[in-house]
Image (tube, rainbow, N blue to C red):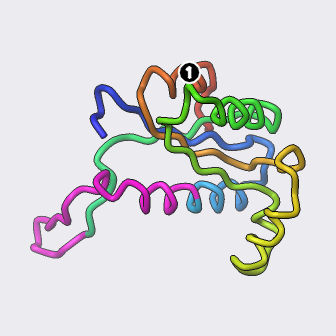
Amino acid sequence: MGSTTSKCVMVLDENLPLGLLANTAAILGITLGKHMPEAVGADVLDGSGKPHLGIITFPVPILRGDAEQLRAIRETLYGVDYQVVLVVDFSGVARCCKNYGEYIGKAAQADESEWRYFGLGLCGPKKLVSRLTGSLPLLR
């Protein structure tokens, strides 16, 4: 992923409590990292010679929106023009489950229109990601 031609952002529902915001960002980041291992840099040594695992090599702004904005962005991402954008979502369907098997079952039973998105992670061509998220403010 070239930092001049690509962009990666997270969009979180600004109305979530702080703990759920942090949890959502962590889940999105872990999933994005699985699908983009090349985005993580080499391990580094500090001035004392102690090792530190590599971290992502480019910034990932955390943006804020509301539930309606997240739903609209997610719906757009299902379109053919956005198939090149890597997207991960975290929803109320996933949050209420105790294990992954339960999530699989609940997801299969819940129509997508019933899903409430807590956050989205997007990585892809800068132009497409910016078109979807460029007007959203940073989460502060």
Region rendered in magenta? 28-52
Q: Residue at x 78, y 54 (%)?
A: 17
Quarter of the N terminus within the rendering:
top left
Q: Nearer the viewer, residue 50 or 97?
A: 97
- Residue visible at 87% across and 63% down? 109
The quadrant holding residue 10 is: top right
- The residue pinned by badge 1 equals 134
Q: Is residue 118 left or right of residue 140?
A: right
> Is residue 122 or residue 107 the one in the foreground?
107
Viewer-proximal residue among 46 and 13: 13
Q: Is residue 109 above or below residue 114?
A: below
**In the image, is residue 38 above or below residue 133?**
below
Residue 65 in the image: state x and y as whole percent.
Answer: 72, 33
Residue at left offset 24%, top offset 56%: 41
Up-down relation of residue 128 to residue 65 (above or below): above
- Residue found at x 59% / y 29%: 80
Q: Secondary structure at mark 1?
A: loop
Number of on-image labels: 1
Residue 61: image x %, image y %?
Answer: 49, 38
